[in-house]
Amino acid sequence: MKKISALFLSLSFLSVSLLSVSAMAAEEVYSPTKKVKVEFFLTDAGQPAYRTYANNHVVIKDSLLGFKLDDGSAIATGLAEVSAKRSASNQTWEQPWGEEHFIKNAYSQLSVALQETAGLKRRLNIVFRVYDDGVGFRYEFPKQANLGNFEITDELTQFNIAEESSAWWTPALAGEQYEYLYRNTNVNKMGLVHTPVTLKTASGLYLSLHEAALHNYSTMNLQSGAADGKITAALVPLTKTTPVKVKLKTPAVTPWRTLQIGKSAGDLITNYLILNLNEPNKLGDVSWVKPAKYVGIWWEMHLDKTTWATGPRHGATTENTKKYIDFAAKYGFSGVLVEGWNEGWDGEWWKNGDKFNFTTPTPDYDINELSRYGKEKGIYIIGHHETGAGVDNYERQLEGAYQFLEDHGMKAVKTGYVESGEMLTNGFYHHGQRFVEHQQKVIDMAVKHHVALVAHETVKDTGERRTYPNIISREVARGQEYNAWSKDGGNPPNHLPTIPFTRLLAGPMDYTPGVFQLALPSRPQNQVNATLANQLALYVVIYSPVQMACDLPENYEKHLDAFQFIRDVTTDWETTRVLEGEIGQYVTIARKQRNGNNWFVGGITNEYARATTINFSFLDAGKSYKARIYKDAKDAHYLTNPEAYEIEERVVTAKDHINVNLAPGGGFAVSLLEVK
Ligand code: NOJ
Ligand code: CA
């Protein structure tokens, strides 16, 4: 048996070997149970390269590694292996909050030290971590006499996909940061795209390419198209006028380049490789970072009922905020987000990057009275820092801005970097190294003042929440806001069953679900392309430790029976199970509450109706649960009858199942509260 598979391996190796490889043997490294293998080798030209196998099938064919530098040299060819060190790790670590309480981190590691054989004899290490469900590798530049400060113009890393594959992606550097609908094409047709990018191979494997631990480096986009399956790293430049992508000083490391592998689409959702490749929590006790549900003065501005700007329709008034605080207190929320509370919003606010002031409230917003009032009712105000991508302006005010939050008991802040065209107001690229450094400065300042961060229009998530658990959620995709005003008709129903398999593989998302009035009287050209039951399901389907109930209080008060689900659902989980799912079609997820025995299930579909059966075998054996099933009514339809729902109640155990019909653009949510 062993001989046959060895023969198979060498045959498949021959069939995919594109590069001219020296006689030197490859360094092989297998994952703990040998499901995944990486082969590292040097080409005839002395360039590092690798391939990856899953269950003995080539997934990544011969792919080159290395760098070009601004001085015209390259650390790429002419390298020789100095040493190869192997190690292994098998640990389980605890998340302070999360979608899974305990995460297993088991991998085999190969660390190869390379050195140029001539010239400057510069040194470069490449470290591979091979998991049973994927691979991470990164470059290390050790401290050395002939490489001190240096500038990278190109990272040459390739991820050459062995099989014909279908890809789900969003375009990079195309003017809207990360806020796109996903496109689905052959992998060769992607062009320049963001990560994570999700692939389905001809043989049915699901892959995700991304990066982990993005610190002091620029974002990696991917470029496809040169040849079959060929994908190359494309770092975001610093500015438009320089070829330089990254400035480093030895010793330095790059982020991890990652490949996640699943047999089903759902496997990708419960793959924790990105988190595992980040450093453990550096903050110690983070009990001040609290998962929460919140409401806020937000949707009403997107609906154009009130404005961010001052004037007769200003939303962030003392009186209006008190109304939201009362609502939050009455229904068990923790926070109230208030946007448009500060100086800087008048005029075309998205161009006010250098005008926003983060310590000066508008005259009609009495922050001292509101923090007193909120405290009395057990509610904190969530701060809002819209920067208009003016990071220099924000950084100048950073200390004062976070002191202000702390002084007013604001335990969380939402940041925003709206711009148009991929550039910060200071001329740096939004997703380049300068912004990555900025985001870290903000995280550090928030730590100093014990503030949790929810970042919109920031750089993509690469798992930093493991190291800095105060960066709790990000937007970084097309969120609910597009349903209110986008000229292309909002987010079509297939957007929602796409993002759990794409954007959400990066980390939690502040989608801001929960619209109950789906036709929008103040925005007759737009509507939310979902049913009410679909909106409920999102509290389970879209993971975020902070979840907004974004609709207006009066719309919830019209449907208090359905609102009960939002009141009951938690945002902090013991464990997560993906029950079924296909990218862009449907997904059903069950999650068990942390510190409790209740379970919650959410399922959604695209524009097609769907019938499904939920088997409750995931429930704890021997326990009974009161199931409340919130589902689309028979005649519900996201376009014509979105608010038609039914609620059914029954007692269930792990032996039961239910059949549910989902309307076009529909969904269902189930709360399973333990019967004691
Ligand atoms: C874009 C954010 O995504 C949205 O949530 C916010 O309301 C506006 N910017 C204004 O800051
Ligand atoms: Ca946004």
Image (cartoon, rainbow, N blue to C red):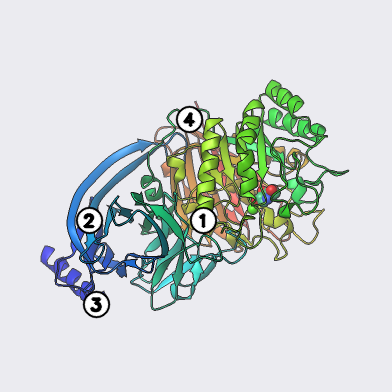
Q: Earlier in the sequence, mark 1 or mark 2?
A: 2
Q: Is 377 placed above or below 180 here?
A: above
- The earlier-in-sequence mark between 1 and 3 is 3
Mark 1 or mark 4: name the one nearer the start of the chain. 4
Secondary structure beneath label 3:
helix
The amino acid sitting under disc 4 is Val
**Which numbered tag is attached to residue 286?**
4
Q: Are marks 1 and 4 in contact (CB under 8 Å)?
A: no
User: Image point 66% across, 42% down: which residue?
Assistant: 385
Res 503 label? 1
Marks 2 and 4: which is nearer the front? 2
Label 2 close to label 4 by CB (< 8 Å): no
Q: Amino acid at mark 2?
A: Ala
Mark found first going from the N terminus, 2 or 4:
2
Q: Earlier in the sequence, mark 2 or mark 3?
A: 3
* Label 2 – label 4 distance at C-alpha: 37 Å
Q: CA distance from mark 1 to mark 2?
A: 34 Å
Q: Is residue 150 visible?
A: yes
Q: CA distance from mark 1 to mark 3?
A: 34 Å
Residue carrying label 2: 113
Residue 368 location, quadrant: top right
The CB of the residue at mark 2 lies under 8 Å from ligand 2? no
- Image disc number at residue 15: 3
